[in-house]
Image: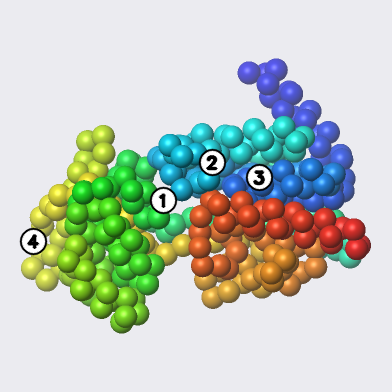
Amino acid sequence: MPTLKTETKVKTVVMAAKKPFDLIIIGGGPAGLTAGIYAKRSKIDTVLIEKAVPGGLITTSEMIENYPGFPDGITGVDLGKRMEDQARKTGLDIIFGRVIQIETSKNTFSVHTDNDTFTARSIIIATGGDPKKLGIKGEEAFTGKGVSYCATCDGPFYKDKKVAVIGDDNLAIEEALSLTKHANTVTIFPRKNTMRAEPILQDRAKSNPKIFFMFNAAIEEIAGDKKVSSIKIKDNASGNRSSVEVDGVFIYAGHKANTDFMKGQIKLDENGKIVTDDDLATNVPGIFAAGDVRAKDMWQAITSAADGAIAANSVRKFLENK
């Protein structure tokens, strides 16, 4: 409606004129929202830029049962909304836009979005990462309805069920082993004919009576009605096609950090994730990183939230010293 467009435009202009901020947080998932809460409580003039939906990747989880404070579980959408509401209650401004570039000067950073430019004395990058998709039929449609990228998050929903794990690296095998605590059978479909996981993990999987391997099978479709009920495969050797009944599909094709806008400016590891010290500072003074965009071993909402708190505290100390 014209009125709403006018109001949004006015707010953007007013905020753009309010330069520079003490802190710009890029990304509105658990890390970014927690950083915003802690920053505002420390009286740090802060704005958060989010490209899509506050809450980030957790909003795609059907149910989260391992986040403290919710003994009966909580949907990802509800948890994300509660985090957003709490952040806004502190006075945190959240604006929407996709960050395309960061420019560094002596005392400030310029953050360019697809709509505007903002400047600040410090930055927290909390852009997270996305699981790499297979791009097969049914994958997108059944995400959150039987298709998952996190056994730690969703494994308990498959008690005594049949599940498939697509992948062949360490993470895929570790998650398959985790799933045996809940599922009745776990069938691993290596993406290639050779396993990339460490031999010790392969041995553990092969010795587990609940785990089966199906080599030489190309996944062509994830099928079902309202939820996943089967996967359709093609035998690469014979060309024969068949259907395998499963209640869930866990996909491990890799994890892509959202750091394209920072390449060449900041130190990344071999997987494109941001390298930080214990205070979550990057190699660029004034730029910090938090959450799944950071090089670390565990990708969970709770660890991302912890990162956000640590990063905000490090920003506070940085600004005080500066």
Judge whether residue 264 can be spotted in this image: no
- What is the secondary structure assignment of the residue under circle 1? helix
Three-letter residue code for mark 3 = Leu
Residue at 57% over, 34% down: 81
Q: Earlier in the sequence, mark 4 or mark 2?
A: 2
Tell me the mark number nearer the camera, choosing from 1 and 2. 2
Q: In this view, does 274 lie to the left or right of 195?
A: right
- What is the secondary structure assignment of the residue under circle 3? helix
Q: In this view, does 152 lie to the left or right of 80?
A: left
Three-letter residue code for mark 1 = Cys
Per the model, the C-alpha gap separating discs 1 and 2 is 16 Å
Three-letter residue code for mark 4 = Asn
The residue identified by callout 2 is: 69
Three-letter residue code for mark 2 = Gly
Per the model, the C-alpha gap separating discs 3 and 1 is 20 Å
Per the model, the C-alpha gap separating discs 2 and 3 is 17 Å
Tell me the mark number nearer the camera, choosing from 3 and 1. 1
The residue identified by callout 4 is: 240
At label 1, counting other C-alpha atoms closer than 10 Å, the crowd grade (few under 14, some 14-19, many 20 or more) is: some
- What is the secondary structure assignment of the residue under circle 4? loop
Q: 197 or 114: which is nearer to us?
A: 197
